[in-house]
Image (cartoon, rainbow, N blue to C red):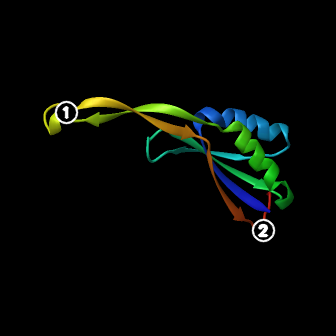
Amino acid sequence: MKLLITIVQDQDVQQLLEELTEQGFSATKLASTGGFLRVGNTTLFIGVEDDKTNEVLDIIKNTCQKRDQYHASPVSPFGRGGVLPRPTKIAVGGATVFMVAVERFEKI
């Protein structure tokens, strides 16, 4: 058995949970915050049998897409004075998945 610790953007989590449920998988949802943009993320703990791991990874890949987002980063004109915001394009979304082998699992 594997535990997939899956971090996704809040925008993708509802659809991902629906797809997982439709395919017979369950997940535990935790609210989390990203470190770079400090935006809302969701961490899902998904327990899955070894032979179903690729099926779950495919659901994640098809649901959590990368997209471009603009972030205003401050720029100082001529090295001094006031700071003007300068929009910078950043790729966000997708998913980060940590796969951990589970020695024992009990549902009580």
Residue drawn where x is 71% and y is 33% of the image = 15
Residue drawn where x is 80% and y is 39% of the image = 21
- Quick check: 25 above or below 11? below
Residue at the bottom extreme, as displayed: 103
Helix, strand or loop at label 1? It is: helix
Mark 2 Cα shell of 10 Å, populated few (<14), some (14-19), many (≥20)? few
In the image: residue 82, left or right of residue 1: left
Where residue 40 appears, x then y in whole percent?
52, 38
Locate the C terminus and report the quarter of the image it occupies: bottom right
Mark 1 Cα shell of 10 Å, populated few (<14), some (14-19), many (≥20)? few
Where residue 73 appears, x then y in whole percent?
33, 36
Residue drawn where x is 79% and y is 55% of the image = 53
Three-letter code for the amino acid on which mark 2 is drawn = Arg
3D distance between C-alphas at marks 1 and 2: 58 Å
Q: Quadrant of residue 84?
A: top left
Residue at the front extreme, as displayed: 78
In the image: residue 18, left or right of residue 41: right
Helix, strand or loop at label 2? It is: loop
Where residue 97 appears, x then y in whole percent?
65, 53
- Quick check: 93 above or below 85? below
- Residue 14 tag number: none
Q: In which quarter of the image is residue 5?
A: bottom right
Where residue 58 appears, x then y in whole percent?
77, 46
Q: Are marks 1 and 2 in contact (CB under 8 Å)?
A: no
Three-letter code for the amino acid on which mark 1 is drawn = Pro
Q: Name the residue under label 2.
A: 104
Residue drawn where x is 78% and y is 63% of the image = 105
Locate the N terminus and report the quarter of the image it occupies: bottom right
Q: In which quarter of the image is residue 95?
A: top right
- Residue 77 tag number: 1
